[in-house]
Image (cartoon, rainbow, N blue to C red):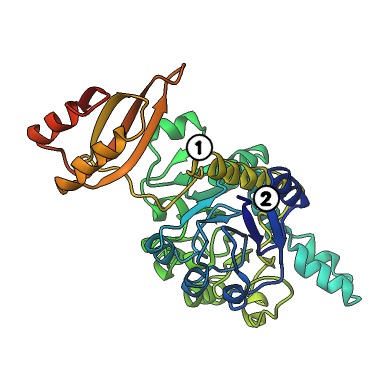
Amino acid sequence: MQLNVLIADKLSSKTVSDLEVMGARVRVEPDLSADDLPAAIGDAEVLVVRSTRVTEATIEAAPNLALVIRAGAGVNTIDMDAASRRGIAVANCPGKNTAAVAELTIGLLIAADRRIAAATADLLGGRWRKKEYQRAHGLRGRTLAVIGFGAIGQAVAARARGLGMHVRVWSRSLTHERAEEMEVEYAATPHDAVRGADAVTVHLAVTPETTGFVNAEFFGAMSPGAIFVNTSRGEIVEEAALRNAIAERGIRACADVYQDEPGGGDALFERTDLIAQLAAATPHIGASTDEASEAIACEVVRIARSYVETGKPTNAVNLRARSEEDVSLVVRHYNHVGVLAGVLDELRNSGINVEEMENTIFSGGTTASCTLKLDTAPDEESLQRIRTGEYVIQVALK
């Protein structure tokens, strides 16, 4: 049966060609908005998005949808609860845009220090203000505080060190030993990291704990006149606190991400009052380089291929983590019709739910081994009935 794929964002043409080589039927509708998507989803089994939001309305309107692939790292634009309720897997492409986002972060940092945007605006207005713009601190020997030390935070730190900057890092997972290994300074708290720093850059995923993470208290710990760069997510920063920090403490802020961003394309962005206060700003283009696009295209195809070949997409982020109470029942058996049906009937009669199942056939096709993850362990009587089943070789609990 042919795989139906809807790509609802602008992606590399390599994504389409490679999916078609797999035998998929691909529809490309890059101008769809979140509101348009429910009517356009049709019979798509796989939905690929980048910036377009996937709402509950889209999920409810898609009877065949089994997989949503976010062509990027975060999944905050997808209604994860609605997808999980319908048994729809959500997968992402982490780490494929690391270099692109790190490069833009450093670009914004330099732009803020050298006031490139303001100097360009003056030149476009016919004003030659060399004396004004030749005054800059420079980055060599300055301290950069990195908040969040995942792949992107680490890439930014490496590039900053290449510019001769001293890098200080806070991350929940960072240890003194890891900091020493990465040649960065360890900070015990976010405020310890930003205090006295010449520049601060934030690289956190959006969670309930990180929403509004950069607030008035955070900005209050920063040095007056320091540079602040956000290329992670707009929800990380409290905008009222940011505005006050710019106006009252002279913070030179740069951003690639904002709260309430348009869905994509050439939509109007009615936030010019905020943009006017920033030292440099870009329209959420951090992940948008040819190198990143090609890497993401390959990852989207890899996820789709794993779904087609195994029924299990790689990088699925809404699968339940296995608890310590889960039990594995391993049944070695002769490869005959009805063996596993008998095992499943016994488990059902015992009120035991099978949460995962994998059957492996051995060379020659005579025997097999089936592993079933159960929500509770069968009692000894149930096990004995399974053991005495026709064509069962051996049964064990793990």
Secondary structure at numbered mark 2: loop
- Which residue bears the numbered disc 2? 24
Label for residue 184? 1
Q: Nearer the viewer, residue 243 or 303?
A: 303
Q: Identity of the amino acid at label 2? A: Ala
Q: Nearer the viewer, residue 44 or 321?
A: 44
Position of 84 compared to 10: left or right?
Answer: left
Real-space CA distance between mark 2 and mark 1, rounded to the nearest whole angstrom: 47 Å
Q: Quadrant of residue 385?
A: top left
Quadrant where the C terminus is found in the figure: top left
State whether residue 196 appears in this view: no
Q: Which of pointers 2 and 1 lies earlier in the amino acid sequence? A: 2
Q: Residue at x 58, y 70 (%)?
A: 258
Q: Residue at x 42, y 70 (%)?
A: 216
How many numbered tags mark residues here? 2
Q: Is 71 placed above or below 260 here? A: above
Position of 9 compared to 46: left or right?
Answer: right
Local crowd size for mark 1, using a 10 Å CA cut-off: few (<14), some (14–19), many (≥20): many
Q: Position of residue 99 (x, y in %)?
A: 66, 44
Label for residue 329? none
Q: Residue at x 73, y 48 (%)?
A: 20
